[in-house]
Amino acid sequence: MIEVRRLCLNLKGFSLNQIDLKVNPQEYFVILGPTGCGKTVLLETIVGMYHPDQGEILIGGREVVGLPPEQRGIGFVYQDYALFPHMSVERNIGFGLKKAKSKIKKMADLLGISHLLHRYPESLSGGEQQKVALGRTLVREPRALLLDEPLSALDPNSRESTRGELKSLHGRLGLTTVHVTHDFEEALFLGDRIGVMNEGRILQVGSPEEVFRRPNCEFVAGFVGVKNLFRGRVSHHDGIERVNLGELSIDVVTQKRGEVYVTVRPEDILLSERPIKSSARNNFKGEITNIMDKGPLVQIDVDVGKPFSVLITKRTFDEMKLKPGMSAYIFFKTASVHII
Amino acid sequence: MRRRDRTIIFFSLMGFFILVFIILPLVTMIGTTSPRSLLETMKDKEVIHAIWLSIYTAGLTTLIAFIFGVPLAYLLARYKFWGRSIIEGMIDIPIVIPHTVAGIALLSVFGKGFLLGKPLSYLGIKFVGAIPGIIIAMLFVSAPFLVDAGKEGFASVNPRLENVARTLGASHWRVFWQIVFPLASKSILSGAIMTWARAISEFGAVLILVYHPMIAPVLIYERFETYGLNYSRPVAVLLVLICLAVFIGLRAISRRGKE
């Protein structure tokens, strides 16, 4: 749907370097990278704010580099929403329409902002502004939607709910979406695929699991750096919630349903050579596959059906005399399991 | 203030002096002019004609400055290009040079037989001793105010608003008129008011190009030279009062626009 080939652009302070990117139809693609890595500039270039020095941009198979933004048919929502402050919500949403009334109404209903139509942007909360910005774009039925850090200007509470709304909106409309963020949870939660970006380059593209579990370079590893990330399905039996990871299932506490990601911090996992009785609900037996020195800590990889990493102090490591191939038990509490 | 702050007291005192210095002459001038002489002056056809000429040439000047200055202001605010800072410097030159110098400079372009004066005279447009001469003199010294204010106004409009509007299918032209201009209009209006005020107060440059027909400042000068203070003062007071009325009126409009 959107294809970027060998895109280069040099601006003062930012540059894009040989960007290759392919976003499939109806896909939710997340570009993940630190602040200042050129994510916003990349979106602005796709949408037509900047003319690339080199490279091609194809939308629906058609080269668009020569076209002005108004002819590209791509929706764009900025981090700060960029609502027109001198126009009411209704006029904001209707800005890009010729015959507006009924479409504005429908879109406002879809986003649940019908009661705001006569208000002005400055009187709206962050979440409301964001919905207006989305509505203003979606009402034109764009071929693709680009979102620049859409959640970062929201307070933590509405961030989580808006994240869910973005996901369900994408589910309903099936609109090809490129979402830029520096927040890895957001990327995990929303992205069908993720591209990690740094210093104007796309370093790795893949499914969230691939990128988080098998980073292809030191930067990606350091930036997304999550150990013990698994995808699974929540099930409920007799008031007990579990996530089935395939080879094993773990006890969790969650309100979420369906497909989720599960992470456990390596320092929250206990390691022992023998089975022990403890309050931790999750305990598994496995085999030590790898031992890595991490300065004051040692990382022990244990395969219990799924590969878990555990961090212990050097002193403990010396006392336990651990070696690859030994069998070991891991324990962690349900409260230590983070669900995304 | 919790305690007597000596710095604040000192600064207030210094500020007070400059305030008195500005207000005292104006108030005294108005106060020492009898209502009767003011009324008589208002019946003086020559005076009314001169004041009206000042008002409407300054208005036309503002209109011309708007038509040519606003596009330039937008370009200067939005785009980085080679020579931009040189242009910005040049725009402000008229503010710093003596106005008689401005008049001489204009004369050497628009005077009879000069660079532009000659071809335009064939078209029947005369500058020396005619209304177009008044307007170019006013324009030269006052246009910078509109360009500067417009530039500031456009710079304060978030470029992202323009970008987003473009992605919503609007052409650059439409984005300018529906988004950028309305949002910068307050600055532009106050720039236009300054331009008008500067134009109406211009004396030196106009005098070099056009003595007749007489604008109000020239008439005041002439009456002072030939008849003295008592004859020129009522005209001056009348001009000041009319200018203040227009000024306050426009300010009120622009303030209402803000709300």
Image (cartoon, coloured by chain):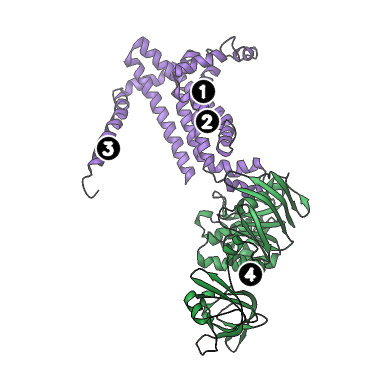
Chain colours: A green, B purple
Mark 4 crowdedness (10 Å alpha carbons): few <14, some 14-19, many ≥20 = some
Which disc is residue A213 wearing? 4
**Residue carrying label 2:** B88
Q: Quadrant of the C terminus of chain A?
A: bottom right
Q: Position of residue A25 (x, y in %)?
A: 74, 61
Is label 3 on the same chain as label 2?
A: yes
Mark 4 and mark 2: Cα distance apart in space:
55 Å
Closer to viewer: mark 1 or mark 2? 2
Q: Considering the numbered disc 4 on the image, is that residue within a helix, a strand or a loop?
A: helix
Q: Quadrant of the N terminus of chain A?
A: bottom right
Camera-nearest residue between B11 and A229:
A229
Closer to viewer: mark 1 or mark 4? 4
Q: Chain of mark 4?
A: A
**Residue carrying label 3:** B11
Mark 3 and mark 1: Cα distance apart in space:
37 Å
Camera-nearest residue between A23 and B194:
A23
Q: Residue at x 58, y 86 (%)?
A: A240
Q: Is residue B153 left or right of residue A108?
A: left
Q: Considering the numbered disc 3 on the image, is that residue within a helix, a strand or a loop?
A: helix
Is label 4 on the same chain as label 2?
A: no
**Residue carrying label 1:** B140
Mark 2 crowdedness (10 Å alpha carbons): few <14, some 14-19, many ≥20 = some
Mark 3 and mark 2: Cα distance apart in space:
34 Å
Mark 1 and mark 2: Cα distance apart in space:
15 Å
Q: Chain of mark 2?
A: B
Q: Chain of mark 3?
A: B
